Image (tube, rainbow, N blue to C red):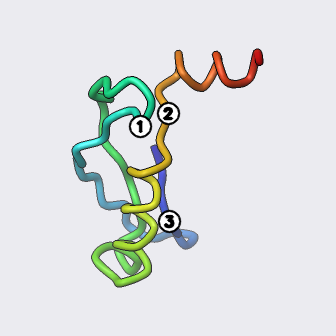
Amino acid sequence: MIIGKILENEKRIKFNAEIKCTNCGVHVPGGLQTGESYFQTDDFKIELEEFKQNYLCGICRDKKRVR
């Protein structure tokens, strides 16, 4: 998944973060990507924390959509 800002022709940084579904607690596999200039900035850290707090796995997301 891409998080944050990636400028045109900018190098992408791939990283892993401990991400769990906020509804069922299932660990979500896979890594994240962001732009080199955005990585490790204060805005990036805030956005990553918000993403972790609001993330739903595919099953929980689909259940929420059907309701």
Residue under the image location 38 percent in, 50 percent down: 52
Q: Is residue 61 above or below residue 13?
A: above
Q: Is residue 65 above or below residue 32?
A: above
Task: Find disc 3 in the rendering and name its residue.
Answer: 4
Task: Find disc 1 in the rendering and name its residue.
Answer: 22
Residue under the image location 50 percent in, 65 percent down: 4
Q: Give the quarter of the image for residue 62.
A: top right
- Residue 56 is marked as 2
Who comes first in sequence, dot 1 or dot 3?
A: 3
Q: Give the quarter of the image for residue 34.
A: bottom left
Discs 2/1, front:
1
Cα–Cα span, label 2 and label 1: 6 Å
Residue under the image location 38 percent in, 53 percent down: 33
Residue 37: give x, y in percent of width and height.
38, 80
* Disc 3: CA contacts within 10 A as few (<14), some (14-19) or many (>=20): some
Viewer-nearest residue: 52 or 39? 52
Q: Are marks 2 and 1 in contact (CB under 8 Å)?
A: yes
Residue under the image location 39 percent in, 61 percent down: 48
Left or right: 11 in relation to 40: right
Identified by mark 1, the residue type is Thr
Left or right: 4 in relation to 67: left
Who comes first in sequence, dot 3 or dot 2?
A: 3
